[in-house]
Image (cartoon, rainbow, N blue to C red):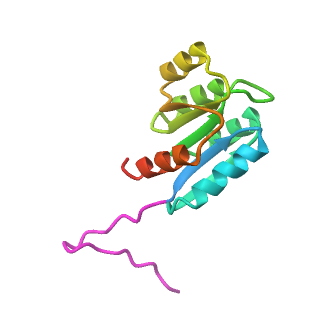
Amino acid sequence: MGRKIAKMDSGGMPVKEPRPLNILILDDDKSIVMMMESILRRSNKDCHISIARHGSVAFDLINNDQFDIAFIDIWLPDMNGLDVVARIKELNPETDCFVISSQNDKSYINKARMLGVEQYILKPLRNEQIRNIMDSAVTH
């Protein structure tokens, strides 16, 4: 059968193929999820998107996969989104986490920062916010 032949650079070393960005969207608001997914798919970045509407589902996903970027709503039907951030950072500290909230609450903002959240994004989301995050993800 056919073997996959690795691409080589000019020095004869194998070239590492870029892998798709693995992205988690955790929000119980279907319209937010659909908007974010649409923006991410149009970003011209190769990405795999996983969607969860409950924290418990997100826990299952993060226990079985590593994400490069996670967009996490604070207010979820079954838990606080910051608990999900804490679990992600425990398992994979390199994941860039972005908290989404309609609440401009300093205590949540401070806790998010302590957990290592990249940015606390207030709703309503703007397309350019998500595009900027995706543009900067390529530079990591």
> Does the magenta portion include 64?
no
Q: Identify the residue at image location x=21%, y=74%.
A: 10
The percent coordinates of residue 110 (x first, y second) are 52, 16
Q: Identify the residue at image location x=49%, y=22%.
A: 113
The percent coordinates of residue 56 (x first, y second) are 75, 34
Q: Main secondary structure of the magenta part?
A: loop
Instruction: Tell me if 45 is positioned left or right of 103 in this view.
Output: left
The percent coordinates of residue 58 (x first, y second) are 69, 38
The percent coordinates of residue 129 (x first, y second) are 53, 43
Q: Nearer the viewer, residue 125 or 100?
A: 125
Q: Identify the residue at image location x=78%, y=45%.
A: 30
Residue at the outermost bottom position: 1
Magenta-highlighted residues: 1-19
Q: Nearer the viewer, residue 96 or 3?
A: 96
Instruction: Tell me if 110 is positioned left or right of 16 in this view.
Output: right
- Residue 27, quarter of picture: top right
- Residue 39, quarter of picture: bottom right
> Does the magenta portion include 8?
yes
For the question of whether residue 67 can be seen, the reply is no
Q: Nearer the viewer, residue 17 or 107?
A: 107
22 over 53 or under it: above or below: below
58 over 40 or under it: above or below: above
For the question of whether residue 140 can be seen, the reply is yes
